[in-house]
Image (spheres, grey):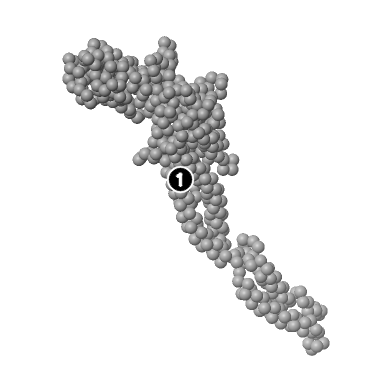
Amino acid sequence: MAINGISFGNTILGGSIQNLKTQMADLQNQLTSGKRATTYSGMGANEGFAIAARAQLSNISAYTDTMMKINTNIGVANTALQALSNIGTQLQNAANSGSQVLNSAGQTAGQQTAVAQFSSVVGILNTQAGDRYIFSGSTIYTQPVAASDLILNGNGAGQAGLKQVISERNQADLGTGGLGRLNISSPTATSVSVAEDASPSVYGMKLQSVSSSLTGATVTGPAGAPPAISIDLGATNPADGDAVSFTFNLPDGTSETVQLTASSAVPTPAGSFAIGATPAATAANLNAALTSSVGTLAKTSLVAASAIRATHDFFDQPPQRVDITPPATLATATAAVNGTAADTVQWYTGDAGAGSARATSTVRVDPSVTVQYGMRANEDAIRSLMESVAVLAAVTTSPTDPNATDQISALNSRVAQNLTIAPGSQNIRDIQVDLANAQTVMKDATARQKLTQATMQNIIDQAENVSTDEVASQLLALQTDLQASYQTTAMLSQLSLVKFI
């Protein structure tokens, strides 16, 4: 019978040594990488939780990247909004205290500054954050505002700019007689009548009210179509100091009052009418004084109010123009018509849909949280600022006009008033607050996500990572076992049948 030799590779001890070597190799890899294994199957039973946690970490990372981009956009937007706010403040200060001296171009130094400021406003509203226009609503790749020169001057090929729209409205508001579309007449020898020239009509000054302390006079109106006011002195002359006041509504929503006082002084003081020898003579003097005062009002405050209203109509959606469908002319027109892209510059070309401007850019920053940070250049606060800057930049006044100073004064006072924040109306600060709220929501979401991130990372670490101290200890133990196994194997390898017997 043959006796086989004792083979190391075929012994149980040899298999045990191989197993120890495999375990040692695994532990050495763990010590080097800090991971339990290089494959999911080697990670153990908790790896399913780690995989889910890793997916959640990936989502958090995506939210973090999104919020970083949004915060960048909001930062750019806040810089732009603050610049707009600063321009508004500078313009209001200039309108309140600026010089009324006209240069050869028919503008004050403040108006020349407004020309530059208007160009700046347009540039700000065309600001981009990356490749998106931040004031264009949902159409982020469309430039929202036309060039400043195009807005003011048109294109010379049929599209009217703001200056032309202001000029047309001015002619319509002044009318053929330059009295703001009012007719002043004397129906009888002792009476004076003031009537609007047409009804209905959107142009010119409108009669609001009349009040009188004229002794013996009969005052009626406004009444009729067109509305009219009548003052009949009757058989008695008014006394010195008696007065009559006419209040007119202007196109921009303001009102002005003309007050005339009866006087026997020679020469007749400003703002008065001479008491004549008879009521008929006095009525003629009242007629002349009223005609002069209304004419001055029309050439000053009405001109300013007309420019303000025309600018508002131009920047509205859609723009409004004077309707000169024949037989109407600019001086006799009574209605307005919508401007079209073919005949009027469209200053805003971004998204003009219904709903909140903020909602035009909405993004999810957490599984249950979204933020809104969109803006439009045609929002009320921004459009109102544009109107104020643009009207000062667009209006010119003849330096030789005796009413030039009063015209500019009336325009400046209206611009300053329009730049004052009215209760209940949107202002630029409101937009900034909306954006700040969006940042607060993102800050809160980031804080929550950091806590979740730490928890998920802990799950992953527990499932996949190893303690280097523990691994080192296991390695030492294995080395001891392996050394003992090698010694035993060496002894067995020297064993022979002779020695065995």
In the picture, measured across the screen, residue 116 lies left or right of residue 252, that is right
Does residue 483 appear in this view?
yes
Q: Position of residue 296 (x, y in %)?
A: 37, 22
Above or below residue 6? Residue 152 is: above
Q: Amino acid at mark 1?
A: Gln
Q: Secondary structure at mark 1?
A: helix
Front-lying residue, 480 or 183: 183
Does residue 384 appear in this view?
no
Front-lying residue, 331 or 278: 278
Residue under the point 42% across and 43% down:
430
Residue under the point 80% across and 78% down:
4
In the picture, measured across the screen, residue 109 lies left or right of residue 224, that is right
Q: Which image quarter is the N terminus in?
A: bottom right
Front-lying residue, 223 or 135: 223
In the picture, measured across the screen, residue 140 lies left or right of residue 299, that is right
> Which residue matches tag 1?
432
Residue under the point 69% across and 71% down:
28
| Residue 264 placement: quadrant | top left
